[in-house]
Image: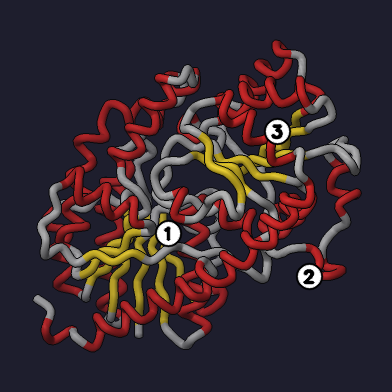
Amino acid sequence: MHIVMISAEYPPRWGGMGSTVYHLSRHLAHNGHKVSVITRSNKKKANVGQHGIDVYEVPWAKIPMYFTRSFAHHSLKALNSIAIKQPIDVIHLHLPMVSLSDNQMKKCRSIAPTVASLHGSWLGERDGLITARNVGEPAVFRNPNDLAILLSAVHYAKYEKTSALNAHVSISNSKATQADFIERYKMPPEWNCKTIYWGVDTDLFCPVEENGTSKRPREQVRTNYGFNYDDPVLLAVGRLAARKGYSTLLRAFRIVIKEIPNAKLLIVGRGGMKKNLYKYATKEGFKPSIRIESSLDFNELSNVYNSCDLTIFPSYYEGQGLIPLESMSSGVPVIATNSGPIPEMVDDEVGSLFELGDEADLAKKIVDELSQRNRLIEKGKKGRQRVVDRFSFKDSCKAFEGIYEDLASDVNDLS
């Protein structure tokens, strides 16, 4: 088969979407399929032609939210060019960062059967930002992209509804996301939507004992960040953006540090909040106990997971969220918000859930987990097994491959 991915993110532009499209494309190419990826142009060039994947970078207007329409326009031009060269069996759209009109969706359907992946919704992103604002997250009004989402999410939501409704099949990345679309957009009963969780690389993200000498020792990673071997280390991973909940995390850590003075916090993520997070930590007197790392590749991030005791995921909104799964796959328990899709992955067996935006509840859960080392280790083992059994990217890729094959075989019945 020839599958065309249309995704606004693809390495070296990572993010959750970029990561999942990358893994899925590699899996398909490894299994002998032809894969073409249409993505946004980037200063750093994509790995064009590697792993049997052709990458087509297209122009896009660097305007918050509007870039999704610009990207859609140029993607359709590239799609037409690809179709002329080689017949396409399936088109896979990755929403919501490509905003296609009704006519553009009809054009896609005329070329090949079309799959729409629902990575989340603009209205969900907006609500996450509203929650962030309500709990005192200052970055909401400082980031142009977040402001654009607050002001224009309703307008751009109509495009994701169009794509989700008119694709031959829609695939949500969680039951919560599917329910979100049904409730927000009043999707009809005949809407063809399935749920396939995006999985993680269980070979890369694994406990130290399962990967032997390829892992850097705990001491070295901790030394790099100025942490002691016996310090309880908390880890948070994700873009430094308002909806990711970092202010809630730091307010909670302010409480934790009073009960566990040698606790440390490592944040891995890029974005404009770094200076303000350090400023808050300085004001509250715990700046020496936190480190913020702007970016790590997958191998380095895997080592970091293995060197920490507990991962915190305080996000106000996610379509699914891969960080909890990466941590669980590494044998590290997770404390995460009790809303949206997170409870579909995390519970008391593999970590804890805390009340969304409640720093006191989060702090209490952190102290409780860190106070029982043996239980923490047991939760890590159960989390690893859960990911291996239910959330590996190999299984999710096989499920998508099955969807493509069904569509391609039924092409004569599609209209």
Q: Nearer the viewer, mark 1 or mark 2?
A: 2
Give the labeled residue for mark 2. 211
Above-or-below relation of 12 to 115: above
* Mark 2 neighbour density, 10 Å: few (under 14) some (14–19) many (20 or more): few
> Could you tell me how far apart the alpha carbons at marks 1 and 2 are, in whole angstroms?
36 Å
Say which residue label 3 marks. Answer: 367
Image-quadrant location for residue 250: top right
Residue 284: tell me if it is visible.
yes
**Number of the front mark, 3 or 1:** 3
**Three-letter code, disc 3:** Val
Residue beneath the point at 19% across and 74% down: 111
Quadrant of residue 275 within the rendered picture? top right
Q: Which comes before the other along the chain, label 1 or label 2?
A: 1
User: What's the mark number on residue 234?
Assistant: none
In what quadrant of the picture does the C terminus appear?
bottom left
Q: Residue at x 43, y 52 (%)?
A: 320
Disc 2 to disc 3: CB gap under 8 Å: no
Q: Nearer the viewer, residue 351 or 69?
A: 351
* Residue at x 51%, y 79% (from the top left corner): 52
Q: Amino acid at mark 1?
A: Glu
Q: SS of the residue at dot 2? A: loop
Residue 61 lies left or right of residue 21; in this view the side is left
Label 1 sits on residue: 57
Indicate the position of residue 220 as horizontal and vertical percent values: 89, 49
- How far apart marks 3 and 1 lie (CA) works out to 47 Å
Give the amino acid type for the residue marked by disc 2 in the picture. Answer: Asn
Report if residue 78 is visible in the image: no
Q: Where is residue 46 drawn, in percent x and y?
A: 54, 60
Q: Secondary structure at mark 1?
A: strand
